[in-house]
Image: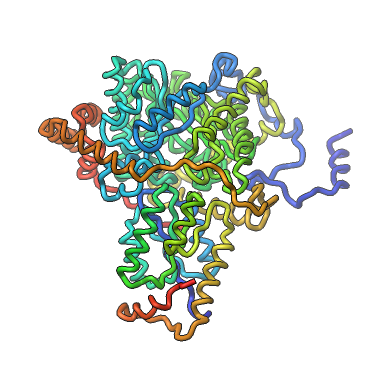
Amino acid sequence: MGKKIRVLVGKPGLDGHDRGAKVVAAALRDAGMEVIYTGLHQTCESIVEAAVQEDVDVIGLSILSGAHMTIFSKVLNLLKKRHATQILVIGGGIIPLEDMKKLEKMGVGKLFGPGTPTTEIVDWINECAFAKTEQPKTKRVKAKKSRKIKVRRKRKK
Amino acid sequence: MTKKDWEGKLKMHKERDSEFTTVSGTPVKSLYTPDDIQDMDYGRDLGYPGEFPYTRGVYTNMYRGRLWTMRQFSGYATPKDTNKRYKYLLKHGQTGLSVAFDFPTLYGRDSDDSFSHGEVGKCGVAVDTLRDMEIIFDGIPLDKISTSMTINPPAAMLLAMYIAVGEKQGVPAHVLTGTIQNDMLKEYQAQKTWIYPPEPSMRIITDILAYCTDHVPKWNTISISGYHIREAGSTALQELAFTLANGFTYVEHGMQAGLSVDKFAPRLSFFFNAHLDFFEEIAKYRAARRIWARLMRGKYGAQSPRSYLVRFHTQTAGCTLTAQQPENNIIRTAFQALSAVLGGTQSLHTNSMDETYALPTEQAVKVALRTQQLIAYESGVAQVIDPLGGSYYVESLTRQMEKGAYDYFEKINKMGGVIPAIEKGFFQKEISRSAYEYQKALEQRKKFQVGVNIFEEEEKPDIEILKIPAAVEKNQIKELKKVKKQRNNARVKEKLKDLRKAARNGENVMPRILACVKVYATLGEMCNTLKEEFGVYHEPIIF
């Protein structure tokens, strides 16, 4: 894989628990990915804006405040609006199993609960990126206009 | 047999690991003997309970006089739901209250603020105006119970609301007992709940110190907290050193503001974590008592013995709970609680088994409370004062902790003190580094978590979870609107104007805040007024 995978690690909302986000950010960085950490107290809008601007492959959201249902659905909707659904959304935090299932159905790629080894997150992202590059015509398109093409190619699994 | 002979014999026995360390990564020896505490002087370094330097406890008779306060941190959804939970806990033998607020409240935002969407009542109870506090404490006599409130940037407002509720119940402020966390320094370092920059935050804190000294003399004005530093990933030593460094910074600011140290220092209290490593935790509490007493007397010139005391609350370590095999959390919590008791805590919260998924259910929180009651009434550990005093290992570890803390103090001093060190990101870096090191140690299986990286099971835990209905947010906003309609808006405006003036001209803001609260100004209105005067804090981004 020639190009480095770019990941935006975000802390949306008012939740100040940043231990997990920082540990995951450091682990992804040490695994060779390019990591952008947003810092705390971001709005969903600013996270999506940063993700599009930075042309990331993955957004990882850490939520321990109980606001996960609201925040994930907002981020997914904003990505749709920006025609940027090629960006994979994943997350972690204090999330009941039932909500995890609902969120995964909603379009969140994967949720990693407490106790997940960081290597599992790294492997999962690598596999997804690999699956992407397997498909024909995977050249990353820089211009925003052409994003629609990528939308269709988006995860159907 | 001499020690040397024994050591020779020991070498012939294979050990099950190549190195042995505490959970914080400090190497430990196979055995501790009188050699390890040779230079310890009983009178100088330990003393009797309730006597300088208080290593063995802050009170003369400790738990033989009165057990620690069993204080479960609790609050969720609406003020009404929270009131019901408090009555439930009191019915089952809890002896103090501890309020958990939701995120909007913690940040001084109203429930109808755009940033609050999705967070109202989720990880604590929502408070917008005095009306909510009236409901939370409805039927709970404030002259009979002490209340701790985990609140930081808007601590002044919540304390004012509590005073106002007391007045309505006919309980004057000088009778009220309780604690506000009000520890902003650890917010910048670890818990990350802030509004204003450090300097105005410190000014509000000293305003509170001054106000309470005169009007709410039994109130604990700052709960200097290591808990969150530890939860954010620090080691035991970092928790100890950073917490005490913060404490001394408050003392210095109070003294600079012209307050007499013996007037406000006795009302400072502490809040520590009870983590996994049993003896390391006990050593941490003992070292904290000794360091604080020595420096308060030696460096800050306090004369009153009450200024020397580290009176502390403890909470078991939420970050050690596992989502896997959640029932194990009951046992983890029990060991941690035991270390807090053997370490001489004044009050204790025990976590519930289901907290890696959500706020605890009634059933889960009852088991957590029962855990404390088992320690108090069955185990026998509360029958003797400081039963571990004199243990070669514990005393040697205590000494080691103490020394390590002084090394950190020196480092922090060289950076110009706690606030410059925060601005440089020193604490933040130290803590994230330790968190990452620990995570790596888990993944390399140098450290273990039962159910996570050892004795794992293929299972999807099926436990009952507390759900906060989506309607909570709507209802809370509806109630807020109702209050706004019923109150005298002209008076609210006038009182907010007075608050702004006080903020600007350096007058104590506490009486002004109390006046705002009484006319039902919202938390957001008060905090925004101060925000306009003081500005907002932006963190240095480090990982």
Q: Residue at x 31, y 77 (%)?
A: A144
Q: Can see residue B429?
A: no
Above or below — where is B172 with respect to B468?
above
In which quarter of the view is residue B160 placed?
A: top left
Residue B267 placed where, x, y %? 40, 24
Front one among B417 and A18? A18
Q: Nearer the viewer, residue B6 or B272?
A: B272
**Foreground pick, B166 / B28:** B166
**In the image, what residue occupies the spot 38% across and 43% down?**
B469
How many numbered badges does the structure rendering display?
A: 0
Q: Which residue lies furthest to the bottom in this view?
A: A137
Residue at 34% of width from left, 23% of height from top? Answer: B138
Residue A89 placement (x, y as % from top left): 43, 64
Q: Quick one: quadrant of the N terminus of chain B?
A: top right
Relative placement, left or right, of B200 versus B384 is left
Residue A30 visible in the picture: yes
Residue lying furthest left: B490
In the rendered structure, the answer to whether residue B212 lies left or right of residue B466 reads left
Residue B402 pos. (x, y %): 58, 36
Residue B231 position in % (x across, y down)? 51, 44
In percent of the image, x 38 and y 75: which residue is there?
A151
- Viewer-closest of A16 and B234: A16
